[in-house]
Image (tube, rainbow, N blue to C red):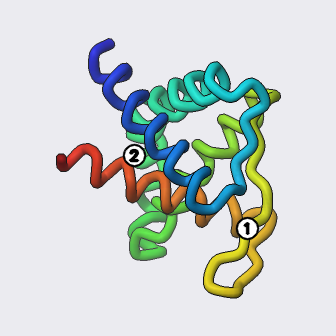
């Protein structure tokens, strides 16, 4: 329980930082939605992600680890699917327009990078 709350706090900060830098996340009621999204992402990170890594181990070996990025993106899709007030919009990064899957991929990569940094601090 303590680990889920710690991860939720880290992911909440990561979501807010990503929103302030890129502005492609929409939280309908601001504060409660951030908490719900952070909780769903924390549960995904701690419970579902290890199971998916084990199940997709042969595919991970064949693709040299690229499937792990897709697994992270699935967590963001899950949060958008479960919470009606949360959505990921298109964004522009270094003059490249990212929409759809690529916006989800970049957002999940950035959030997981921030989560890694927060865990190391």
**For residue 90, above or below residue 73:** below
| Residue closest to the eye, 5 or 53 | 5
**For residue 28, above or below residue 74:** above
Q: Is residue 82 left or right of residue 16?
A: right
Image coordinates of residue 56 in percent, x first then y, are 48, 53
Task: Give me the disc on residue 68.
Answer: none
Image coordinates of residue 52 in percent, x first then y, are 48, 43
Q: Residue at x 32, y 12 (%)?
A: 1
Mark 1 or mark 2, whichever is nearer to me: 1
Residue annotated with mark 2: 54
Q: Residue at x 39, y 58 (%)?
A: 113
Residue 51 in view in this figure: no
* Disc 1/disc 2 C-alpha distance (Å): 32 Å
| Residue closest to the eye, 121 or 50 | 121
Say whether disc 1 or disc 2 marks the residue closer to the N-terminus.
2
Image coordinates of residue 38 in percent, x first then y, are 52, 31
Residue annotated with mark 1: 91
Q: Residue at x 62, y 48 (%)?
A: 74
Q: Secondary structure at mark 1?
A: strand
Where is residue 6, by image quadrant?
Answer: top left
Q: Residues within 10 Å of mark 2 (few under 14, many from 20)?
A: few
**For residue 24, above or below residue 55:** below
**For residue 60, above or below residue 32:** below
Residue 38 in view in this figure: yes
Is the Cβ of the residue at disc 1 closer than 8 Å to that at disc 2?
no
Q: Residue at x 58, y 43 (%)?
A: 75
| Residue closest to the eye, 51 or 42 | 42
């Amino acid at each position: 329980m303590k680990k889920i709350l710690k991860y939720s706090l880290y992911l909440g900060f990561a979501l807010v930082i990503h929103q302030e830098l890129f502005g492609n996340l929409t939280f309908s009621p601001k504060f409660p939605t951030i908490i719900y999204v952070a909780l769903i992402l924390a549960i995904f990170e701690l419970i579902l992600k290890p199971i998916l890594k084990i199940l997709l181990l042969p595919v991970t070996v064949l693709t040299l680890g690229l499937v792990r990025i897709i697994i992270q993106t699935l967590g963001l899709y899950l949060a958008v699917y479960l919470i009606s007030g949360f959505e990921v919009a298109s964004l522009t990064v270094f003059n490249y327009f990212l929409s759809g899957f690529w916006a989800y991929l970049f957002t999940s990569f950035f959030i997981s990078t921030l989560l890694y940094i927060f865990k190391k601090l």
